[in-house]
């Protein structure tokens, strides 16, 4: 683990102030634990993904999560029951936010906004059901199924960006989309880097087109959620 300059300064300060090795060990352990959880809790297959594998028949989990931003949108089916969920920070106090004293407001927003980064992605306070009509749920599932995401190639197979003949369009600051397809016996992860940008600059990839269509469906059906 690389110890940051900030950590070294903190350790040095407390060592001079307390001359207590236990304080130094505690600080290092705390920082290591915090950074480890923050780096691992929002990457790859999380406890939340495994929960759906155990308890649902088929699930789509789409996300643009990274170390600075965490949000998952979920479409799942158990037998004939279709449901949707969202996992995101809950830092909204409602339209009367300004009526709350600033110190309380700031503390709530800061603590809730940061907490999501330091606990594993799981069925916890950040996991919430969203409610759609039965017709909307049925349409959402049918439209998603028609895209046959299990059969598409992602950027791990086709490569990021454009083909070699079109490499002048390469960027390094684009967004990404992760999609996890989950059944009882398998979890498949698809990854796409800046699919909207590259689909415009070098169209033609079926996988890119499919993930953009699926992402658009999630945007439509999760609007206002």
Image (cartoon, rainbow, N blue to C red):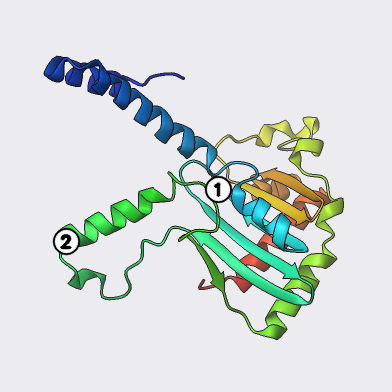
Residue 102 numbered tag: 2
Q: Is residue 205 above or below residue 220?
A: above
- Do the numbered discs 1 and 2 sit on residues whose CB atoms are within 8 Å? no
- At x 32% / y 69%, what residue is drawn? 93
- At x 81% / y 66%, what residue is drawn? 145
Q: Tag 1, which secondary structure?
A: loop
Residue 65 numbered tag: 1
Q: Is residue 18 above or below residue 107?
A: above
Within-10-Å neighbours for mark 2: few <14, some 14–19, many 20+:
few
| Residue 182, x across and y down, in percent | 75, 55
Q: Which quadrant of the view contains residue 91?
A: bottom left
Of 89 and 13, the residue lying toward us: 13
| Residue 130, x across and y down, in percent | 56, 73
Within-10-Å neighbours for mark 1: few <14, some 14–19, many 20+:
some
Q: From the viewer's perspective, is 86 left or right of 18? A: right
- The reply to whether residue 203 is in sight is no
Q: From the viewer's perspective, is 11 left or right of 222? A: left
- At x 70% / y 77%, what residue is drawn? 137
Furthest residue in direction right, as rendered? 151
| Residue 23, x across and y down, in percent | 24, 23
| Residue 165, x across and y down, in percent | 80, 31
Of 108 and 63, the residue lying toward us: 108
């Amino acid at each position: 683990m690389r110890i940051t300059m900030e950590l070294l300064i903190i350790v040095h300060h407390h060592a001079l102030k307390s001359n207590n090795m236990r304080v130094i060990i505690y600080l290092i352990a705390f920082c290591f634990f915090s950074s480890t959880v923050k780096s691992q809790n929002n990457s790859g297959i999380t406890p939340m993904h495994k929960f759906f594998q155990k308890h649902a028949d088929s699930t789509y989990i789409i996300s643009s999560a990274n170390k600075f931003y965490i949000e998952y949108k979920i479409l799942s089916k158990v037998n004939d029951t279709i449901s949707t969920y969202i996992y995101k920070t809950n830092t909204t106090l409602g339209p009367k936010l300004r009526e709350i004293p600033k110190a309380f407001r700031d503390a709530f927003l800061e603590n809730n906004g940061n907490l999501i980064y330091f606990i594993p992605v799981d069925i916890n306070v950040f996991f919430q059901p969203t409610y759609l009509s039965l017709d909307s749920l049925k349409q959402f599932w049918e439209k998603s199924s028609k895209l046959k995401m299990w059969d598409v190639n992602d950027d791990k197979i086709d490569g990021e960006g454009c083909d070699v003949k079109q490499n002048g369009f390469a960027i390094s600051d684009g967004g990404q989309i992760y999609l996890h397809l989950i059944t009882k016996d398998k979890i498949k992860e698809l990854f796409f880097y800046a699919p909207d940008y590259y689909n415009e600059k070098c169209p033609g990839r079926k996988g890119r087109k499919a993930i953009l269509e699926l992402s658009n469906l999630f945007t439509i059906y999760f609007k206002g959620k």
